[in-house]
Amino acid sequence: VVMAASAGHESAAEAARSWNDGRPDEGFFLDRFAAAIAEALLRHATATIRAEFLQPGERLLAHCSPGCGKWSLDGQSRLATLLGANGSAVVGGFASEPGEMSLGPVTLLASGALRPQHSMLAALGVTRRIVRRQSTSPCRRCDLERCRYRRVPHCTDQPLTREAP
């Protein structure tokens, strides 16, 4: 299963407006909220697929996204193509440049980044094998060791412990 999720152009514009108006706290929190919205949209879509489309005995694997963990950002163009992206359009007030691909309100830039920011492309596998339940934390499932946004320690084979103050 391949899907795209986005918090939209409006959230990025409003966060930038807050920063430019000298309200960095508001801009920062709006930016982080938009990131959480994109992740929540993927979780909601995954739950909907699981509840409504899987056949008996099928299981949905956790989503993976290009640029996260060991999957190179080059994978974005393959997912965009699978989603029916085309190379020329006007999206969200932006005209596509050479090398860009339009996915409706989301544009894949030639660099591999997505516009608007806080957009994600993801792939999910469907299996009939029994799958060990994974953590609900996206950071627990991610193998990107040096992520500056990591919310939990990287080592996934040991329980979380609190260090003494």
Image (cartoon, helix red, strand yellow):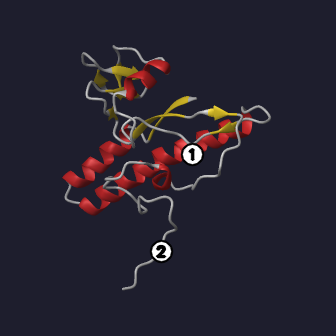
Marks 1/2: CA–CA distance: 27 Å
Give the SS element for disc 2: loop
Residue 104 vs 24, above or below: the answer is above
Q: Residues within 10 Å of mark 2 (few under 14, many from 20)?
A: few
Upstream in the sequence, badge 1 or badge 2? 1
Residue 127 horizontal side relative to residue 24, left or right? right
Task: Tell me where residue 59 appears, x and y as whole percent.
Answer: 69, 38
Q: Residue at x 30, y 20 (%)?
A: 100
Residue at numbered disc 1: 43
**The residue under label 2 is which amino acid type?**
Thr
Q: Nearer the viewer, residue 97 or 82?
A: 82
Place residue 116 in its image quadrant: top left
Identify the secondary structure beneath mark 1: helix
Q: Nearer the viewer, residue 102 or 79?
A: 79
Locate residue 143 relative to residue 98 in the image: left or right: right
- Residue occupying image coordinates x 31% and y 33%: 113
Image position, residue 34 (x, y; %): 41, 49
Tell me which corner region of the image, top left, top right, bottom left or bottom right, holds residue 124.
top right
Q: Residue at x 59, y 39 (%)?
A: 45
The amino acid type found where label 1 is placed reads: Arg
The outermost residue toward the bottom is 165
Q: Give coordinates of residue 73: x percent, y percent.
A: 34, 33
- Tell me the quadrant of the picture where the C terminus can be found: bottom left
The residue furthest front is 157
Disc nearest the viewer among 1 and 2: 2
Q: Position of 47 compared to 38: left or right?
A: right
Q: Which mark is residue 161?
A: 2
Answer above or below: position of 39 versus 153.
Answer: above
